[in-house]
Every structure is written in C-alpha cells, then in structure tokens.
C-alpha cells in the first residue's frame, strides 16, 4: 500500500427529508465541499494513528483491539472495525483528516468523513458503492450511536456531477429493509433504486446558509423522531411508513409525523416533475412547503433555523427549507436571477461522488 488520498463530499438534500428510514423517496446531491483523508502506510507495528487537523486532536489504536470512542474518533474506529468485519484487510497507517465542511452544519460532514475514510483505507477502491454506503451507515448506527438512514451515504458515494439522485428506498418488488422497526441496513440483496435527475437551474441558484445552531444526530430529536415513526408503524400494524396511506386515527403527535412523511414523499416526485419542466417557481414553492411540514408536522425546527429561513425569504428566495436531520444546521434556498442572497450564503451545485484523488 502506498500513500492514498481520498475525498468525500458533503451533501445537500433538495427535498425528501426524514423519508429515508421510512422506506420513502429523496432527492439529494453531493456538493463540492467535503472532507479529505490521507492514509500513509506505517512501516511497522499494528496501529492506526489518526489526526484531525481542523480540531488539533489525535487518536491511536491497535488494529487487533480497536475499542470504542466518541466524536470523530468513533467514526475512524467504527470505519476500521466495519471494514475488517466486511473482509477488507486494513493495514497499519497514519491517517490525516482535513476538510472544508463545518461539523454540525447539516451538510453531512459525517458521511463525507466515512466515505473518505473507506476509500483511503481499502486496498482496491473498485467496490460496490451501495454496499459501501450500507457499511458507512453501520458505522453511524452501531459505533457512533446515530440511528440515521442511508440518504447521506448514498448521495456522497453515488452522486453524479450536474445531477440530483432520485432515491427510492423501497423500490417496487422489495421487502422493507430500512424501516424504523428493523434498524440499519444489512449487507446483502436489498438495493435502493437510484436514478440521476438533471439539475438544470439556468440563471437561478441554490445556496445554503448556516443557521448557527449546531446539531448532533447521536442525541436528541433525531432518534426520538425515528422512534415515533416506529411507534406509528406499530399502531398501524405495518412494517414501514411506505405502506401507510393516511394518518387518520393515530394519536398526536404520531399523526403529524406520518402526515409529514406521506406529504414529503409526494413532494419528491412533484420536485422531479418541476425540474423536468424547468418550472423553478414551482420548485421554490415545494421547498417552502417541505419546510412548513418539517416545522409544523415533524417539529424539527429551532428558532435559529426559522430566523435563517426568514432572512433568505426577505432577500428574495423563491423557497427555503432546512436540510438534513434538522434541530439546527443549514437552510437551503433557491434564488431567482437578480436576487442577492444574504451575507454568509454559499452557492451549492451538484459535484462528483467521493473518490480517490
Ligand atoms: C440525516 C440522516 C439521514 C436522513 C436525514 C433526514 O441527514 O443522516 O439519514 O434521515 O437526516 O432526511
């Protein structure tokens, strides 16, 4: 093994939030900001030494005795453990992590890091990307403690320049896998369907603006929402919310959670249709409708996010919505030609998937 440098991009989810673990639909894309991991072989010993340059922190552990940890260290240790469990030979090396994707900003620095780590550490990077995404999601679920779905990892590992990905987490003919009751994705035959959708915005542009409120998936609201969706499945006697047709009769707040998932799945296809018709006004309306649903039905907003949405709308956005797990993080907005986004907003466009440099 020689020195390997791999880059994992962040992601923006255009629409389809909190649908992945409910076997639903989403429309994310990889962006041009991300995390870079360099792996340099160590001539002797059996250790992994890791440095997070942006944080000024270090870690070291033996390959035969990885042990648990927290924060960024849990991602590194978890990735090495899952690679080994999947039969990849991980060699002793020094890992350096750096990036331009702020942690906790809702642009999936986690998936960017997992993907870059995997591609830097595996012997041969010609691997099945969906299986790698599942492996990364096991790192988050089983080692970091965030019960996240597969959205971010697929966007980051399967993204296509100039395109969003329409992901159906339960394509016709497949049994439920990603649903809240079963937990994370196992290796094996379940394969979400991934269809690239051209993202042609002409003179319009998408921006993200950080709300300043950081979020952590491993605690708080995200895992609670996921448990509520599982409870709704139980009450409805179904395996996953993809089988639900109505929220009627459920006790509050489960009825609101289900209503969000049902209407959000419908908005994903409405967005794909709006993009195909180059109807960007409609695309903006759908972003705002998604935000209202996440705020009122899913109750995943916080005051900082609401203020950020308002600032973007005042600046002339055709639509704006929180992205990612919510409870903080960034807001995505679509601006028509001629409008000037507020200070701090950063343009985002669909970039290439994770890869070796
Ligand atoms: C986070 C999770 C994803 C997904 C989104 C919400 O980004 O990592 O799996 O659930 O939140 O859509």
Image: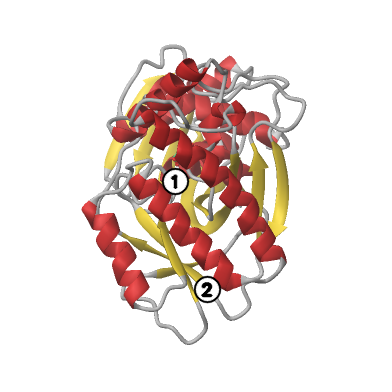
- The front one of 302 and 30 is 302
| Residue at image mark 1 | 108
Front label number (2 vs 1)? 2
Q: Indicate whether 277 appears above or below 186.
A: below
What x and y, as percent, mark residue 99? 41, 52
Position of residue 270 in the picture relative to residue 93 (left or right):
right
The kind of secondary structure element at disc 1 is loop
Between residues 326 and 78, which one lies in front from this camera angle? 326
Mark 1 vs ligand 1: CB under 8 Å?
yes
- Image x and y of residue 315, in percent: 35, 78
Identify the residue position indicated by label 2 in the image: 205
Q: What residue sits 30% from the left and 27% below the top?
A: 70
Q: Pick out the residue farthest to the top.
A: 65
Asked if residue 205 lies left or right of residue 320, the reply is right
Residue located 61% across and 27% down the image? 243
In this view, the residue in front, 70 or 316, is 316
């Amino acid at each position: 093994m020689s020195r390997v440098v791999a880059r994992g991009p962040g992601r923006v989810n255009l629409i389809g939030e909190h649908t992945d673990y409910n076997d639903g639909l989403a429309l994310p894309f990889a962006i041009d900001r991300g995390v870079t991991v360099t792996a340099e072989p160590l001539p002797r010993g059996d250790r992994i030494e890791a440095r997070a340059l942006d944080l000024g922190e270090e870690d070291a552990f033996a390959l035969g005795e990885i042990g648990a940890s927290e924060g960024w260290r849990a991602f590194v240790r978890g990735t090495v453990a899952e690679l080994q469990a999947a039969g990849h030979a991980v060699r002793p090396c020094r890992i350096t992590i750096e990036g331009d994707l702020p942690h906790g900003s809702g642009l999936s620095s986690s998936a960017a890091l997992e993907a870059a780590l995997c591609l830097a550490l595996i012997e041969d990077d010609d691997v099945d990307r969906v299986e790698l995404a599942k492996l990364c999601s096991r790192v988050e679920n089983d080692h970091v403690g965030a019960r996240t779905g597969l959205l971010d990892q697929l966007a980051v590992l399967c993204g296509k320049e100039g395109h969003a990905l329409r992901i159906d987490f339960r394509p016709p003919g497949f049994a439920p896998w990603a649903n809240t009751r079963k937990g994370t994705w196992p290796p094996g035959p379940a394969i979400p369907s991934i269809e690239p959708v051209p993202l042609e915005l002409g003179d319009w542009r998408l921006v993200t603006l950080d709300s300043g409120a950081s979020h952590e998936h491993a605690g708080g609201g995200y895992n609670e929402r996921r448990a509520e969706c599982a409870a709704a499945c139980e009450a409805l006697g179904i395996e996953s919310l993809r089988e639900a047709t109505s929220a009627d009769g459920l006790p509050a707040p489960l009825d609101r959670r289900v209503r969000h998932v049902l209407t959000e799945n419908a908005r994903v296809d409405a967005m794909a249709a709006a993009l195909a018709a180059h109807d960007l006004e409609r695309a903006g309306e759908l972003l705002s409708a998604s935000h209202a649903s996440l705020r009122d039905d899913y109750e995943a907003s916080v005051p900082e996010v609401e203020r950020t949405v308002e600032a973007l709308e005042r600046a002339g956005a055709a639509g704006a919505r929180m992205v990612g797990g919510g409870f903080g993080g960034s807001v995505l907005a679509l601006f028509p030609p001629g409008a000037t986004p507020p200070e701090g907003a950063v343009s985002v466009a669909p970039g290439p998937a994770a890869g070796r440099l």
